[in-house]
Image (cartoon, helix red, strand yellow):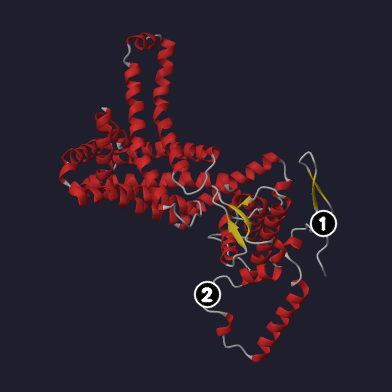
Amino acid sequence: MTPAHADLLSRLEALIWDKQVLERPRWQQGALRLVRTVLILGRDLAMGQLTLRAMSLVYTTLLSIVPLLALSFSVLKAFGVNNQIQPMLRSLLEPLGDKGVEVAQHIGEFIQNMNVGVLGAVGLALLLYTAVSLVQKIEESLNYIWHIPQPRRLGERFSRYLSVLIIGPTLVFSALGLTATVLNIDTVRQLLAVDALGQVVEVASRLVPYLLIIAAFTFVYLFIPNTRVRLGAALLGGTIGGIVWQTSGWLFAVFVASSGQYAAIYSSFAILVLFMIWLYVSWLVLLFGASVAFYTQHPEYLYLGSGEPRLSNRVRERLALSLMSRVASRFLAGQPAISLEQFTQQMRVPMHVLSAVVTALQDNELLQQTGDDPPLYLPARDPSMISVTQVLDAVRSAGEARFFSPDKLPTPAPVDQVLAQIRTAVETAAGSVSLRDLAGLPEESVDVLDDGAEERTEPTLLPH
């Protein structure tokens, strides 16, 4: 690479990742955000985590597709719409061409031959577990994309999974059956005979597959992750994911039509190989759409560099003091408590960066969360009883119990003396500063007026 090209790339990189982007006009902010999102999505695909999780979902799908459809079939049979499973399977496997019809027929035969009544209690439990495991694997993958370390509680997962496995297919197939019934009404047929209305219906029929996939993707992004996803972000991710999925289906159909060598190489296994490839593409598109929804809702994650950033000690300290100051200020002023997402938006830092600091503060009983959804954060005790040095010690000592403590390190005596002097200096400078002082609110700083408004006096300065 010539120096001129290197200089051009350096300037382009500085333009895209400019830290003063908020000072630019709105259209430039939007353009830079779009470019950043595209680059970050490409980086995520190149790193391989999305592809690995898509492969994992393919394996789980192969194990659970028959039990899953059998469970849905038993429910749909009670509503009289079980005969629509085969057309839906053929539609989903349409990119496989003639082989898709064959795969759908084999799956249908497996479902018909599965007799739930002869499985017994253990067999039925295994059937339910196999069907539920697919939804659980989807939740784990989406939680990874949304940087959520903990899954839902067992009871909540059970209720949501049953809703996805039972209520979801029932509503989809019932809607399809209702549409077919309406189209068969004589009055509707007469209206469709009019050229203008007929053309509108024809265009709408071509858009229906896109709308159904977009609705399905949006539902998954809203319902499955263990976090509150905004409708706008989920809809944008579902729209892009649905369009990419339909386009991928068209391209894959062209690939299958021109892949006669697969039959020569794999013989009768060619159907299974193509089916697995299409499953992989489908799951990868689903995860890609989830990433779009995530970066739409959390633009603070659009930063340069690969992987998650590692926090330095001074960044941890600054985040911890800022968080505790805001929490205490709201608490003392009688304002609503702050959530983790609100704080990430105010500080413009990724949520997983802040989660490590919050965990350290909670482990040291300086911060506690409420039972709200999403959780809100309050001081664990009176802010005047929490000192700045306690907050600093909490983030500095995070993780020591799992490995080893500083006391176990064989350090020379001069090093111990210097560290002791540093700690003494910190305690002398900030030992008398409490969290109440850090919040900028003295003891009598808030006077509640008769009309419910609050009059705040000037905050006192921190002691020197």
Q: Secondary structure at mark 1?
A: loop
Q: Is residue 81 visible?
A: no
Residue 388, picture quadrant: bottom right
The residue nearer to you, when weighing 301 against 342, is: 342
The residue nearer to you, when weighing 123 against 12, is: 123
Q: Is residue 194 left or right of residue 344?
A: left
Q: Which residue lies under the disc numbered 1?
A: 459
Task: Point out the frontmost of discs 2 and 1.
Answer: 1
The residue nearer to you, when weighing 333 against 160, is: 333
The amino acid beneath tag 2 is Ala
Residue at image point 34% right, 11% down: 189
Q: Distance between the Cα atoms at labels 2 and 1?
A: 38 Å
Q: Which residue lies under the disc numbered 2?
A: 401
| Disc on the earlier residue, 2 or 1 | 2
Q: Secondary structure at mark 2?
A: loop
Above-or-below relation of 80 to 185:
below
Above-or-below relation of 104 to 273:
above
Q: Is residue 37 visible?
A: yes
**Quadrant (top left/top right/bottom left/bottom right) for the N terminus:** bottom right
Residue 113 screen position, x and y as percent: 16, 40
The amino acid beneath tag 1 is Pro
Residue 314, picture quadrant: bottom right
Residue 277 screen position, x and y as percent: 32, 47
Q: Is residue 83 left or right of residue 209?
A: left
The 10 Å Cα crowd at callout 1, few under 14, some 14 to 19, many 20 or more, is some
From this viewpoint, which residue is outermost toward the bottom? Answer: 413
Residue at image point 64% right, 41% down: 30
